[in-house]
Amino acid sequence: MKPSRIYLDYAATTPIHPEVWKVMGEVALNVSGNPSSIHAEGRLARTVIEESRKTICKSLNASLSELFFTSCGTESNNTILIGAVRDLGVTRIISSPLEHHCILHALDHIARHHPVEVVYLPVQPTGQPDLEVLAEELKRSEGTKTLVSLMQVNNEIGTTIDLQEYGQLCHDHGALFHSDTVQAVGYTRYDLDRMPIDFMAGSAHKFYGPKGVGFMYIRNDHTLQPLLYGGSQERNMRSGTENIAGIAAMAKALEMACDTLDERSSHMMARRSQLLEGLKKVIPGLTVNGPPMESCSPKILSVNVPEGPRTDLLLMNLDIAGVSASGGSACSSGVESASHVLRHLPVRDGDKTVRFSFSPQTTAEEIDRVIDIMASLTSTTAQVLSSTKD
Amino acid sequence: MKPSRIYLDYAATTPIHPEVWKVMGEVALNVSGNPSSIHAEGRLARTVIEESRKTICKSLNASLSELFFTSCGTESNNTILIGAVRDLGVTRIISSPLEHHCILHALDHIARHHPVEVVYLPVQPTGQPDLEVLAEELKRSEGTKTLVSLMQVNNEIGTTIDLQEYGQLCHDHGALFHSDTVQAVGYTRYDLDRMPIDFMAGSAHKFYGPKGVGFMYIRNDHTLQPLLYGGSQERNMRSGTENIAGIAAMAKALEMACDTLDERSSHMMARRSQLLEGLKKVIPGLTVNGPPMESCSPKILSVNVPEGPRTDLLLMNLDIAGVSASGGSACSSGVESASHVLRHLPVRDGDKTVRFSFSPQTTAEEIDRVIDIMASLTSTTAQVLSSTKD
């Protein structure tokens, strides 16, 4: 029997949870009105959206007026960054070169079209933006309307930052704080009412919800204009007929994620440790990207495999052997070259980086098999894998 | 037995077709990778997207490189208008005051932030933009990079324009032609390769597809920059992880719509005529918005009911009587005041406008019932409706 594939790329995207799909179907098939319509079908659709908003706001401890539905994390992050410059008068943005492209490319666009200075912090070898330099930059920013944008969990290497620590530093210096939390929502507890965060973004498909729906959090203190102009949906923050079924499914997915957060984290942390320890044993010279476990997302493990006679097409060979992993992020994994993130980290020339990312369903047996496969693929003595015989 | 409701608001949104939902489920549950990933799951997801693109391009006779997936019609229209100004050097835009808000509000935004002159054509009493004035304006535009943006089917009154006629006039004068075709896609045949159209937009939920997914057509001659910056999906025209299941469902919905276009049109045209003739008989002084049948979308009938002692809350009373219709568009139907479209038409003061919109499943019996209900609700002699007794 052909062994089933092992998917370890949950940071790229997660499959929709069957319970979430059930909710999505109930809404898609039974709630067919346009939420802007005043008739019964429209009012029902409106109710579904507002109940979903309540569910998500409860999970995040945010006010209902602070949550806006969008089509994805990219749209949320773009809306926030562009809005902060256009509508709040931000003229200085401090970020990190390790952010997701939906931050970096949006910042490039902003710098081209607006009189805004964009500053990138140096990063520590672990991937964390340097806190001391941030403090210096914030001092330099005083008197200048400044936004700091730093991701909570790095999508390629799992590095996390403490939102409380970074956000408080920003607020102490009068700067706004935005966090791209796309990889963290559903894996972290938030108490937004008490946290020093002005903006954040979420995407349902990262936490077992559907693709094509996300949200943005905009603290009540701030009034942004939309990125999309039209029917003035979402209290004029996001025009376009609402993806009702997607929104309801996202709410269900986040509710489930929060209900089981601790056990899911422990499970993934165990699988991550198992894989790391196993790989260290079978691959001499293997190194890890990112900080020690306590500052790393339990769902992501990024390792560097030393150059060897057979490591050239490691990801492709892993795929052939039935293991789905990634080099950098999915969004840039079409090419097997060092990603913009890895280029800023102390990765040795010639090393092949592999990102494994886990789900609460990833089993110890799967991890053992991945360790065996990785051992075979990187072994300097020719060897034929049992799982490639089929 | 309580009679079932009669939904006649298909221009606001259509329910997802069961066959479309089936496709959506197959993809959502079985295609769980990220299309940007290079492993097997990613490649499968990529294949689904590209097959969907082929299906839609075949329906429209467009090249694969001209179609881009988005989250909705609003996003498509916004991307095109903003891109034409920012990237193609358009400094003059000619449009109509009867466009959807996703055009009008985007144009307001553009006029505020870019050195662009926006000109609104006068409209005929039927809602059609004046072709002679358009020709004059185009002459005046010569030497100035100009975009004309006119919707194919007006969402409130059903007025259609001949894309060939308007588009050719634009091209004859060297102007670009964009059409907001959101209400027309799935109800019209396109041969984009041969039509004088530079840009158009579609939204799946208007043709029995899911909410939260749309597309834009950008003729190969033009290179726009995206509105959303990030992972460079859709050949860098629209960043954000693709809504794979939504895209596949949209392709199925459009394919089905095109396969049955003629019989669906005839059916809706018959229901429209039946309703109009019936209403004329029971409501003295009733007038119709829009042009004669041959220049009107078969799915939309907008009528003005003369002011009477009981017409004040006509839409709400219709809703209570089990009929879902709309005043203007869904996007502005939260308020029962004359819409921006109706204000430009020869509607008598005090008239109540009702937009009925039809589906291929709308039955003659339903239409008869609606005529009865409308008669009762607008009758000047007090009368209790049978359908409100329950």
Image (cartoon, coloured by chain):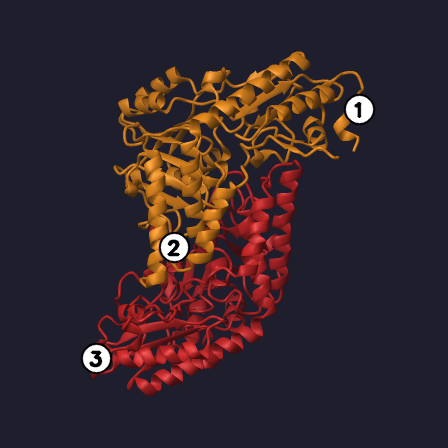
Chain colours: A red, B orange
Which residue is pictured at 50% across the width and 51% down the height? A70
* Mark in front: 3 vs 1: 1
Quarter of the image that includes the N terminus of chain A: bottom left
Which residue position is annotated with label 2? A106
Residue A52 visible in the displayed image: yes
Residue reaching furthest front? Answer: A1
* Mark in front: 1 vs 2: 1
Q: Position of residue A347 (x, y in %)?
A: 29, 77
Which residue position is annotated with label 3? A308
Closest to the observer, A121 or A214 = A214
Cβ atoms under marks 1 and 2 closer than 8 Å: no
Instruction: Establish whether labels 1 and 2 are both on one chain.
Output: no
Q: Residues within 10 Å of mark 2 (few under 14, many from 20)?
A: many
SS under mark 1:
loop
- Horizontally, residue B35 falls left or right of residue A381, namely right
Instruction: Establish whether labels 3 and 1 are both on one chain.
Output: no
Label disc, if present, on residue B384 of the rendered structure:
1
| Disc 1 chain ID | B
| Disc 3 chain ID | A
Q: Residues within 10 Å of mark 1 (few under 14, many from 20)?
A: few
Q: Please report whichever mark, 2 or 3, sits nearer to the chain's N-terminal start.
A: 2
Q: Position of residue B219 (x, y in %)?
A: 29, 36
Measure how far apart labels 3 and 1 are at the Cα level. Answer: 86 Å
Q: Position of residue A31 (x, y in %)?
A: 60, 44
Q: Amino acid at mark 3?
A: Gly
Q: Amino acid at mark 1?
A: Val
| Disc 2 chain ID | A
